Amino acid sequence: MKDSNDSLKAPLIGGHAAIDFLNTSFTPEHEAIETIGDARSFLKWLIASGLIDESAATRLMKRSGPKALESAAAEARKIREWTREWLGRWRAKPRMAYADELAYLNKLLARGVSTHEVTSTEEGLALLERPGLDSPEDLVALIALQVATLITQENPELIKSCAGENCSLWFVDRTKAHRRLFCSAAACGNRAKVAAFRQRQKSETPS
């Protein structure tokens, strides 16, 4: 697997943070690309995805040190591959109990610390729960929280893998008709159109 932290960023096209997290490892040109191969790139992805801000990342770096953050990044990569495998099964059979998987996910969630805050909204007062960001453990729990919201709030039938040849990207299909096939119309979608056009030309050409 190629580590391309500086030259290639993970695409944020998944429609959900948990899906974008899965897409931090992908195969754009037949070769697996790892975009969170170290603590620095992991923190950069968390910022880019909107899960933490730069001040939180700086605070974590000062408090925790590189060794603890590298460990959290390594664990996040393991959680990503576990999540990818489980979600593949969950999409096909969402009503199964999955006792072992849920127990593991709940253990990850329990490692985080959260705070509560009352805020004013257009609908009135609301009580918000905010995940704590004081240690690398909180980052692991934050990733687990994204997976938890995905499986409890999203329709498994709308969590899809790109239909493009050799593309490994996932997305939540939020189109009105739910007929989205590709991670990107400009990339995989366009390549599929070109391939289909060439195939038609080939079949129409007299032998």
Image: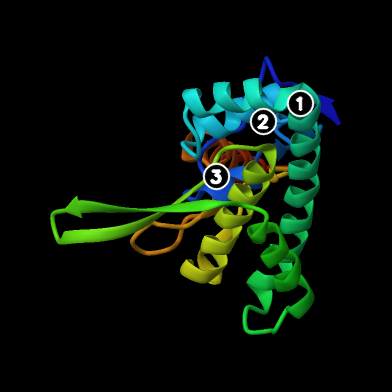
Crowding near pointer 1: few (<14 within 10 Å), some, many (20+)? some
Residue at image mark 1: 38
Residue at image mark 2: 42
Q: Nearer the viewer, residue 27 or 15?
A: 15
Tag 2's secondary structure? Answer: helix
| Foreground tag (3 vs 2) | 2
Left or right of 31 on screen, residue 187 = left
Task: Please give the label number shown on residue 183.
Answer: 3
Q: Is residue 201 above or below residue 146?
A: above
Disc 3 from disc 2: Cα separation: 22 Å
Tag 1's secondary structure? Answer: loop
What residue do we see at 60% from left, 58% from top? Answer: 147
The answer to whether residue 204 of the structure is visible from this angle is: no
Residue 29 screen position, x and y as percent: 75, 30
Q: Amino acid at mark 2?
A: Phe
Q: Nearer the viewer, residue 84 or 130?
A: 130
- Please report contact status of discs 2 and 1: CB closer than 8 Å, yes or no: yes
Disc 1 from disc 3: Cα separation: 26 Å
Q: Nearer the viewer, residue 59 or 53?
A: 59
**In the image, farthest residue toward the right:** 1
Residue 122 screen position, x and y as percent: 13, 55
The mark that comes first in sequence, 1 or 3, is 1
Task: Please give the label number shown on residue 81.
Answer: none
Q: Amino acid at mark 1?
A: Asp
Tag 3's secondary structure? Answer: loop
Crowding near pointer 2: few (<14 within 10 Å), some, many (20+)? many
Crowding near pointer 3: few (<14 within 10 Å), some, many (20+)? many
